[in-house]
Image (cartoon, grey):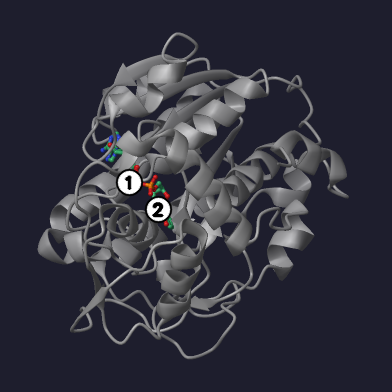
Amino acid sequence: MRGLREVYARTSVGFHYPAGMSSSFRALVTGGAGFIGCNLARHLLSGGHTVRVVDNLSTGFRTNLDEIADEIEFREGDLRDPATCARATTGIDVVFHVAALPSVPRSLVDPIACHENNVTATINLLQAARESGVRRIVYSASSSAYGDTPTLPKVESMEPLPRSPYAAAKLAGELYTLAYARAGLIEGVALRYFNVFGPRQDPNGPYAAVVPALFSAAMRGVPMGIYGDGLQTRDFTYVDNVIHANMLAATQPAERATGWMVNVGAGTRTSLLDLVRLVSQVTGREIELLHRPPRAGDVRDSLASLERAKAVLGYEPPVSLPEGITRLWSWLQEHPEALSAPGAGSVAPR
Ligand SMILES: NC(=O)c1ccc[n+]([C@@H]2O[C@H](COP(=O)([O-])OP(=O)(O)OC[C@H]3O[C@@H](n4cnc5c(N)ncnc54)[C@H](O)[C@@H]3O)[C@@H](O)[C@H]2O)c1
């Protein structure tokens, strides 16, 4: 299996550490107990960086950090609290702002909580980072900002048309981050992720993402509920691609990267039914589907244009969907406990 280090060695752009930043930096990963954050924290450690995590454990788990607990500084705290943000950003070079209250349907149930955790928390963090002298912030944005326009692929210059409080809140956080960057208050890059999947993604609960829920259904031999006809398409993106983009966003020269929002996907779109077939093929198990009515806030099709990501960051997705599904299956076989309980499966752009 090809490691990310080799991938970095291969990229035409490679890493350019900003002036004044040594090749290892002090990183804050907000939401580091969650799916993407804990994978990013592991990767940063393996690159010799110092890692602090702040997380309120609302949707993340301490156990996601068990294997690296002795190597990171973990702070349980809530970014809605400005004092927590001030303490978390002290002595930090780069903030990876991964924390959020995710999920489109959750935001329709409780839009105020969505706003507080995704927007108020972000501006608190930006202000604290600025006052603490943090060099750069890399914001985890979301493809849900594009909404349900028929135009594919989604290009960054398109008008954003959010269809849920979650999509609006993620877009607001992105706009604040880039406004701070363009105002010269802090360097900032926003990465719009397209449906991410990989190890340590929670398969449980009503807001579970579709890939871990599919593996859970395959392993337990139970039917999988899917919303709509299954012909909706997504740019399913293996988490190593997202980590690769974060590392590039943290290290490209400011004059090249700061102030930009870029898509991060795998650059191919796959229907939910084709995804089910792929998981069946890789696991060797049939998956029975239970069709449910389409859900409010869901969009029909999604695909990332990666042209800007390539131009601004030198990003090209290192891992394809079939390779990502195969890697996840290998990981799950080593960690069967990761799929221990039922999941429902959402295919909403996240
Ligand atoms: N997973 C995807 O497909 C996807 C797609 C697009 C964008 N994103 C974005 O990527 C980021 C990570 O998503 P994820 O899938 O890993 O979600 P996750 O729920 O696994 O992780 C989010 C983490 O943030 C923490 N958190 C939430 N509110 C907080 C607060 N107020 N203070 C401190 N910590 C808080 C949670 O406890 C959790 O550990 C989010 O910003 C999300 O919007 C994810």
Relative to 103, is 264 on the left or the right?
right
Residue wearing tag 1:
100
Relative to 277, is 205 on the left or the right?
left
Q: Which mark is residue 314?
A: none
> Viewer-proximal residue, 272 or 74?
272
Q: Considering the image in quadrants, where does the C terminus appear?
A: bottom left
Q: Give the residue at x 44% y 87%.
A: 149
Q: Secondary structure at mark 2?
A: helix
Q: Give the residue at x 44% y 40%.
A: 333
Question: What residue type is disc 1 on?
Answer: Ala
Question: What residue type is disc 2 on?
Answer: Gly
> Viewer-proximal residue, 205 or 194?
205
Report if the beta carbon of the residue with label 2 is closer than 8 angstroms to ligand 1.
Answer: yes
Expressed as whole percent of the image width and height from the top left, the position of residue 33 reads 35, 31
Task: Confirm or deny contact between disc 1 and disc 2 (CB under 8 A).
Answer: yes
Expressed as whole percent of the image width and height from the top left, the position of residue 236 reads 51, 65
Q: Quadrant of residue 133?
A: top right
Up-down relation of residue 16 to residue 75 (above or below): below
